[in-house]
Image (tube, coloured by chain):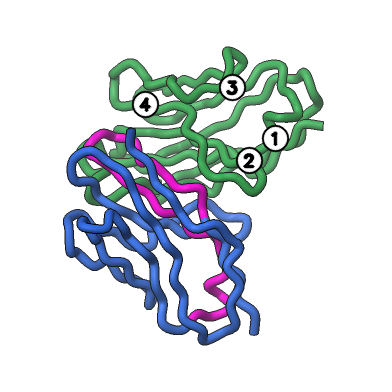
Amino acid sequence: GNSVTQMEGPVTLSEEAFLTINCTYTATGYPSLFWYVQYPGEGLQLLLKATKADDKGSNKGFEATYRKETTSFHLEKGSVQVSDSAVYFCALNTGFQKLVFGTGTRLLVSP
Amino acid sequence: GAGVSQSPSNKVTEKGKDVELRCDPISGHTALYWYRQSLGQGLEFLIYFQGNSAPDKSGLPSDRFSAERTGGSVSTLTIQRTQQEDSAVYLCASSLTTGVGSYGYTFGSGTRLTVV
């Protein structure tokens, strides 16, 4: 079946450090891939997406590249801020209505 | 509306009582989803409505859980005889019929349910 695997958290970084949150997937066909972010006390917000292989999604300094050969969609940011502290969810869609989510990775950024 | 609206934002209830959670999706979004997020856990799919089609109830954890969507818009998730393990944040999301692969979902802010 379709599934998403994320690295376990929490990921703890100092401000201005480089961030990578790993995400790999298993899916039939060619899924669309998403990263959602959940700030404390809020719902999930779409951060970025990629709909086909080699696409790069980007938003707010975050980037992720759809790698079909490694079935990955790792989230990166060159310099994190305290305000980036949140839970990040990787998700996929294979053309049916439901998104399949990973378990989320908590990011903690200290000043 | 401009976004997905959920109410109440917080609900504390006694074990054994029934609760109703409400979701008002984005106008024009024909698909509506309910998810549950337990403390420190990922997202658990509960139920999905698409237009006038029969809902996909495959994620409902027990027959104490039910949901309806009236007039293709507002949805109510009902939990009967609540138990402590029902304590979680209940998230609602909506999407365009043909847009999930391109646009994903839009989520509401959730209802935090605490069963005491």
The residue wearing badge 3 is B78
In depth, the one of A70 and A93 nearer the eye is: A70
The kind of residue on which mark 4 rests is Phe
Decide: marks 1, 2 in contact (CB < 8 A)?
Answer: yes
Which residue ends up furthest to the top in the rendered image?
Answer: B63
Give the chain of mark 3: B
Decide: marks 3, 1 in contact (CB < 8 A)?
Answer: no
Which residue shows up at 51% across the image and 48% down it?
Answer: A103
Q: Residues within 10 Å of mark 4 (few under 14, many from 20)?
A: many
Which residue shows up at 18% across the image and 64% down it?
Answer: A54
Which residue shows up at 46% across the image and 84% down it?
Answer: A79
**Quick check: A74 left or right of A86?**
left
- Which one is earlier in the sequence, the residue at label 1 or at label 2? 2
- Which one is earlier in the sequence, the residue at label 4 or at label 3? 4
Q: Is residue A81 above or below residue A86?
A: below
Marks 2/3: CA–CA distance: 17 Å
Which residue ends up furthest to the front in the rendered image?
Answer: A70
The kind of residue on which mark 2 rests is Ser
**Chain whose colour in the figure is blue:** A
Decide: marks 1, 4 in contact (CB < 8 A)?
Answer: no
Is label 1 in a helix, a strand or a loop?
loop
The residue wearing badge 1 is B87
Q: Residues within 10 Å of mark 3 (few under 14, many from 20)?
A: some
Is label 4 in a helix, a strand or a loop?
strand
Give the chain of mark 4: B
The residue wearing badge 4 is B49
Q: Colour of chain B?
A: green
